Image (cartoon, rainbow, N blue to C red):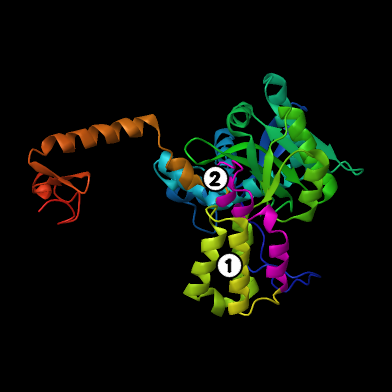
Amino acid sequence: MCDSKGDCNESSKTYYKRRKRLTIRCGCRAHIQLKSVDGGFFEVDYFVEGHNHRMVVDSDMQFVHSARKLTHVQEEAIYELSNMNLGPVKAFNLMRTQYDGFEKVGATKDDCKNFRQGLNCYIGEYDAEMIVQRLCAKKTFSSDYSFEYDVNDNRELIRMFWADETSKSNYLAFGDIISFDATFKTNKYKMVFVPFTAIDNHCHSVTVCAGLLASETIESYTWLLQMLLKSFGQAPKVVTDQDPAMKQAIAAMFPNTRHRLCMWHIMKKVADKVGADLCNNEDFKSRLCNIVWTDSISPLEFEKKWQAIMVEFELDKNKWLTDMYEIRFDWIPAFYRDELLSGLILRNQKLSQKEAVRIYTRAISNDLQDEMNEIVGSVSQFSSCEEGGFLRCKIMDFNAYVPGFLEDGEFGE
């Protein structure tokens, strides 16, 4: 039968609300009827050839439902692109470019969306099982890969911990002092992402391991630290935020570890605790930062200047600042100025892709050195004189050799 068979009965009563959409039914009677002959063959019994509507032209065939179908290769491409955070619409646009026209894809954007929706419905029931199986398989084939997980009584995934070979190498080289931050949360699963971060020789963040927790409890953090100790065999110095559950877990698992609080997390809250007006006061900000973000002053000097600031700006009754002063031994550098913390206590340790791009590699160093040698070699006019025990060099007409490299008048005469 033709797809346009039958009539659209607008007066039919239904018990649910229908979506308003166009119909192609126009009462077309074109059809073919077959009958069986001897049980093995068929012959035409009745045939109506004429249609009462226009036929679909070849250029519009991709819009006919019966002609639309995603191939296995296209479905695989949509899945792989979704793993790279590219949605079904972008996947369709990529296929349109690849096939040189949307009419040659063989499907529409809605088909790509429907496939991705169906895939999400399938994965939604087995996503935890799939990730556990995948990481367990990786652990089987890689002897230096660590992966642990825990489930509750309902067989629901509540905790995960993993560390690969590169992370373990980072821990052996830079893991004497680490930071772990539980301020990351996923939107879909409501689990807390906890990366353990260290500082490398370039003063950039490197990941040493990571975990996922369903709840921020002492039990969860204790389990996470147990897995870290199981994987690496030694406890580090730790820098965290002010989570009380973290503090108790660290004290229980790493009794000999010096626990410090992250200054960035504490100073970030100052604006909310003291108010916008005072936070915009340049004198207040300058004086507070000068005693907090430094280890060049003594503990006694810090205490005197802190009290002076509190009195002058009428903050001596601010409960939060009072509480921060009581735990000053855990986050003010003046009280552990002799401890080596690799700069971790003074840095924002949230993972940053921009930092990874700015790593000063050997190739960049060689390129820059060659460039500077070429510039210096092109400068032939300079003079020098001794002033106050120092040798002062003056480059003559520097901009004539390397225009735009420096501002006019910065060097030379």
Residue 360 against residue 8 in the figure, above or below:
above
Can you give x and y, in whole percent of width and height, for residue 158 in the image? 81, 44
In this rendering, position of residue 65 left or right of residue 120: left
Tag 2: amino acid: Gly
Judged from the image, the secondary structure of the residue bearing numbered disc 1 is: helix
The answer to whether residue 158 of the structure is visible from this angle is no
**In magenta segment, residue 409:** no
**Residue that appears at 11% across and 37% down:** 378
**Residue that appears at 52% across and 68% down:** 287
Residue 154 against residue 366 in the figure, above or below:
below
Q: Which mark is residue 343?
A: 2
Tag 1: amino acid: Lys
In this rendering, position of residue 348 left or right of residue 363: right
In this rendering, position of residue 411 left or right of residue 337: left
**Residue that appears at 80% across and 44% down:** 251
Occupied quadrant, residue 377: top left
In this rendering, position of residue 23 left or right of residue 18: left
Can you give x and y, in whole percent of width and height, for residue 102 in the image? 44, 47
**Mark nearer the N terminus (2 vs 1):** 1
Q: Which mark is residue 93?
A: none
Looking at the image, which is closer to me, 340 or 81?
A: 340
Q: Which mark is residue 305?
A: 1
Judged from the image, the secondary structure of the residue bearing numbered disc 2 is: loop
Q: Residue furthest front?
A: 388
The answer to whether residue 146 of the structure is visible from this angle is yes
Quadrant position of the C terminus in the picture? bottom left
Give the magenta part as a residue range. Answer: 319-346
Occupied quadrant, residue 198: top right
Can you give x and y, in whole percent of width and height, for residue 141 in the image? 68, 19
